[in-house]
Image: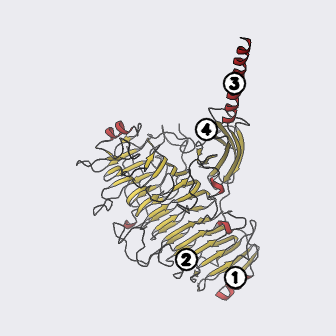
Amino acid sequence: MRATSFSKGFLGVLAILALAQSLAAASSKIAEVKTYGNFETAGIIIKVSGMDFDETAKIEYRKSGETTYRRGHDFVRYDGNHMATSLFGLDLASTYELKITLTDPDGVSGTNPVTSSVKTKKEYALPKPLRVVKVSTQAQLDSALGKAKPGDEIRLAAGTYAKGIHIYGTKSGTAANPITVTSQGTAKPVIKGTSDGGIELEGLSYYVFNNLEVHNESGDGIGMRGCHDIVVRQCYVHDSRPGDYTNNIFIQHGEEASPAYTGNYLILNNKIGDNVHAKVDENQGPGATNVNVAGQSYFGICVAYQPGGFLTIRGNTIYGTVDGIHCCGDEGGSPVMDPNDLDVLGTWRDQNLDVYDNVIYDCKDDGIECDGHMTNGRIFRNRIGKCENAFSMAPFYPGPLFVIRNYAHGFHQGSFKQNTGVEGITRNVLIYHNTIMEKTRGTTAHCGDEHCLYRGEPALEQNFVYKNNIFYARGRVYNGDMYTADNYHKNDVFDYNLMYSTRQSDKTYVYKWVCSYGDSLNNTRYTSFAAFKAAVKQEKNGKWGDPKLVTSLLKGYSKNSKLLDLKIQAGSPAIDAGVVIPGINDKYSGKGPDIGAYEKGTSGAGRKAAPVRRGR
């Protein structure tokens, strides 16, 4: 009996020890914090050791000198051992103190919360030169570039420089003293070029190109390969070589830079477009929408082959190309990494992207194409006009991608493209406070039905969140197709959106819901918002009604641009009807945030969103 009791007791102790070891093994901790500060945003990435996917993390932040922390947007897990989030609406040239708290049902070890800091950039200004070199001929320009030293400002006289600018890996500036190429006066010198490019840079760093016109029909407009810390500012880049996958601005191959994958490109306040090409019709033809018409260059701005992180595309006007901005590269590139794979940024390096305050229109295919890899991307305050799809995430990974306060009208297929046959799971896209209005159509839609948001197949897509958006449709608000095994749209959240369709007088279904192939709700149709809510258990706090949008043309743009004002008017059901999303909209006017891109009671017009007051 004694031996048996001892055995039972000993086995009990072993069980307790095993349980304790199991719990200890399951606990997690913040192992590393990395921060990046841009002009008005910041990116934060944490590495979590012991992650078993039930952890969450929050961030609080305050400007140095303040006493009270504010809540930021919660972290989003993007691979098997990392989470990321972003901060918005920060002041220039300011230091922010951060407090990051990890929560794990299995326990948290180590320091928790963890503190850190991030500093935003000051507003960009041209560097002060150490030496000014004036040129007026191609020969003088070539000589000045060949002899360039850090701090040089090479000033071009008005005129045409037929051979362009080609610099290969021998003459770079420094962080303190970049090399600047600019105009002598207000008139933009014209850079032509060759099949190698109008302005072609390889293996260079710390250059600024300012107030130039680049018109190279023989090759790309501006090409940057294996470079870092390059600024393109207030240039007019247009009508580059027409054809398949040609570029007005092209950034590529960060692995060839020194140090590799440094990035830090700034594309600021440029006009980029294609003026001379065959007409693109109302249905985005002739031909397939992703094929250029005669004389048309393909990309306004293209990013590919892992150019490096920390790219800012801000304040540009882009028009007339097939795709406006292709800002994430290498879609479907090998290896395709799954959501639980470790250390994605060790393989796919692009991170902390900012695309904002751009106006994009008259594109044959996509306005902003996010197809490919990006960790912690931010797409906000852009205006999208005539195009096939306003935004494309087909595919997109690993995220998170914040899509916030954009205006879109004039798309022919849909607002957010997600269906693709390219390998990989599209995931972690957060769509907040956008105003989406489907255009009126003179002819039947080429996709077989009119809709505002299309979620079709083929698709492997998960973890999209749609909150506080206006979806104004001419037919179906949400539409989709899912008829193929092993395809899905899953774990998506729709809530607090304001929806409306002008098709009120016929029996057309207002919603067609898709989820996972084989699910009983997949491909189900609903004739009313109430029926949709009751069946699919989405939009619990959503609203139906005319948002009362201002539909006059955006000032300064033609009717064909399809760029509309899209502010909400007095009496709109969008006013004060949104949900507070920490770190996104906790500064608002009224009793609550307004749904959509515009906050009533502020100017809200034009390219840049006006600052808004804190809620009362």
Marks 4 & 1, CB-CB < 8 Å contact? no
CA–CA distance in space, label 2 to label 3: 68 Å
Using a 10 Å C-alpha cutoff, classify the residue at mark 4 as few (fewer than 14 neighbours), some (14 to 19) or many (20 or more).
many
Q: Sequence-wise, which precedes: disc 4 or disc 1?
A: 4
Q: Is 389 displayed left or right of 166 in the figure?
A: left
Q: x, y (%) of residue 153?
A: 71, 75
Tag of residue 16: 3
Marks 1 & 3, CB-CB < 8 Å contact? no
Tag of residue 220: 2
In the image, residue 336 above or below residue 9: below
Q: Which element carries disc 2, helix, strand or loop?
A: loop
CA–CA distance in space, label 1 to label 3: 80 Å
Q: Sequence-wise, which precedes: disc 2 or disc 3?
A: 3
- Look at mark 4 in the image and give the residue it sits on: 55
Using a 10 Å C-alpha cutoff, classify the residue at mark 2 as few (fewer than 14 neighbours), some (14 to 19) or many (20 or more).
many
Q: Which element carries disc 4, helix, strand or loop?
A: loop
- Look at mark 1 in the image and give the residue it sits on: 134
Task: Single out the mark in the foreground, 4 or 1.
Answer: 4
Q: Sequence-wise, which precedes: disc 1 or disc 2?
A: 1
Task: Single out the mark in the foreground, 2 or 4.
Answer: 4
- In the rendered structure, which amino acid carries the disc numbered 4? Glu
Q: Which element carries disc 1, helix, strand or loop?
A: strand
CA–CA distance in space, label 4 to label 1: 59 Å
- In the rendered structure, which amino acid carries the disc numbered 2? Asp
CA–CA distance in space, label 4 to label 3: 24 Å
Q: x, y (%) of residue 365?
A: 43, 65
- In the rendered structure, which amino acid carries the disc numbered 1? Lys
CA–CA distance in space, label 2 to label 4: 46 Å
Task: Single out the mark in the foreground, 1 or 3.
Answer: 3
Assign the N terminus to one quadrant of the image.
top right
Marks 2 & 4, CB-CB < 8 Å contact? no
Q: Sequence-wise, which precedes: disc 4 or disc 3?
A: 3
